[in-house]
Image (cartoon, grey):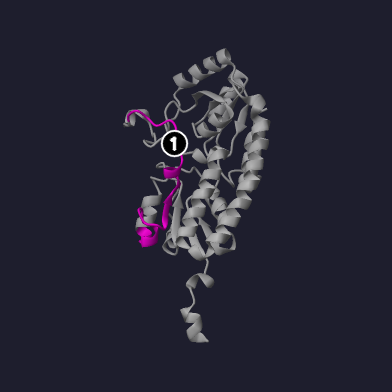
Amino acid sequence: MRLLLLLLPLSLFANLNIAVSYPYIGALTKSIGGENVNTVVLAKGNWDPHFVVPRPSLISKVRRADGLIMNGGQLEIGWLPPLTKRAANPKTNVNTKTFLNLSHHVELINKPASVDRSGGDIHPDGNPHFHLDPNNILILANVIKGYLSSMDSENSIAYEKNYIKFSDMWEKKIKIWKEKMLSKKGLEVIQFHDNLAYFNKAYGLISIATIEPLPGIPPSSRHIIGLIKLIKKEKPCCILHDVYHSTKTAKYISNKADIPVVLMPHDIGALDSIEDLTSLFDYLTSAIK
């Protein structure tokens, strides 16, 4: 009996341990993987996704992983490469079948014509916040299904069933969110940072300015004064603000220009009420009044 157990496939006894960079990827991987996959999320949803400290606990998680899924688009460029290097796990190396870069499977927007420090902390591949278009979530779910199936072909039927169940649910939700946002099409908005580019494009919102004059660059007094003048002239509906930057400047502008500040969570866990992908988009599509 013991010899027979040793000869059976390992997948019958052990789930895949998949490390993922962000909570939304963890939720998708869990939805598709079901009981056959353990997901390990490295960053928390209320953290700035650009800056994650590669703590020893994260190193050990990557070291034990059977695979790694990242957002890509150089969103993790400042923290994930040092983490995987210290973990020294060949299964999390780039260009292996156990490594997945999601940005390679969607069309990135806002790709800069040139890249240099004068443009701020720009992403040369384009805007990396593509998961905030709910239509891209379906693409990513399908990609993750293929990724898991390539690593664990014995459970590919289960992954396919889980994907179909998720996609059926998600397509219904997309219709609901589209209906909710129809009246918002054409609204002008201000952002702190252009992390909502894909959400805005999906629903026809027009971003006319950002509080950051350039990505990652704090606003000067001159820039703030110019924003206040622009808001009074153009009368955008609101300032859309992420949860991980201070709202102090946005509230100052709000008071001076009589414009509301609307918190827009970017990931699961960004706010206490955002417990899954559905509640993330329920919130986002209800936040703008």
- Where's residue 94, x and y in %? 36, 53
Which amino acid type is shown beneath numbered disc 1? Leu
- Please give the name of the residue rendered at 56% of the width and 23% of the height, measured from the top-left corner: 253
Q: Which residue is mark 1?
A: 108
Residue located at (49% from left, 21% from top) = 224
In magenta stretch: residue 268? no
Q: Does any portion of residue 274 appear in the rendered image?
A: no
> Left or right: where does residue 109 sit relative to residue 255?
left
227 vs 7: above or below: above
x and y percent of residue 86 in the render?
A: 36, 58
Residue positioned most to the top: 233
What's the magenta region? 86-114
Give the secondary structure at mark 1.
Answer: loop
Residue 95, above or below 115: below
Query: As rendered, which of 238 and 160 lies closer to the eye?
Result: 160
Residue at x-position 55% and y-position 44%: 138
| Extreme-bottom residue of the structure | 1
Where residue 251 appears, as percent x and y from the top left, is 58, 27
Front residue of this view, candidates 258 and 18: 18
